[in-house]
Image (spheres, rainbow, N blue to C red):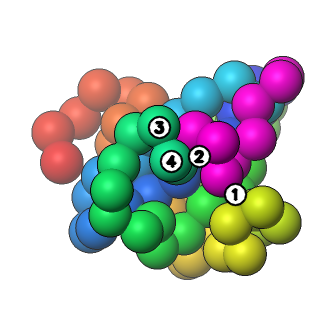
Amino acid sequence: MFNAKYIRWGRDNMYIFPPAGNIHCEIAVRLCDIPPISAGFIKILSDGTIQCYGESISLGLKAEPEDSEIAKRILKGDEI
């Protein structure tokens, strides 16, 4: 199973990164001056389903329902 963290800015801007040793708020500060709108975790299930879930404690943000579709397009290389 694939596991990652993510942060989303704006409608379709999402940064996906490895969970080990990375804290959401530290990544967010390095990447963008705009406050993120959602953050959490990504997993790809054995059937290929991509799911965003959970929350970032350090940012105080949760996964939003539309995040899974955005992550799916990014991970599959589709245009956003």
Three-letter residue code for mark 1: Gly
Contact check, label 2 and label 3, Cβ < 8 Å: no
First-in-chain label (2 vs 1): 2
Q: Dot 3 corresponds to which residue?
A: 30
Q: Secondary structure at mark 2?
A: strand
Q: Nearer the viewer, residue 47 or 79?
A: 79
Structural distance between the alpha carbons of marks 3 and 4: 4 Å
- Which label belongs to residue 40? 1
**Can the viewer see residue 61 in this picture?**
yes
Q: Residue at x 68, y 48 (%)?
A: 24
How far across and down, in percent of the image, does residue 22 sit? 75, 31
Depth check, mark 2 against mark 4: the one in front is: 4
Q: Secondary structure at mark 4?
A: helix
Contact check, label 2 and label 1, Cβ < 8 Å: yes
Three-letter residue code for mark 4: Val
Q: Which residues are magenta?
A: 20-27
Q: Residue at x 52, y 48 (%)?
A: 28
Contact check, label 3 and label 1, Cβ < 8 Å: no
Q: Dot 2 corresponds to which residue?
A: 6
Depth check, mark 1 against mark 4: the one in front is: 4
Q: Nearer the viewer, residue 28 or 38?
A: 28
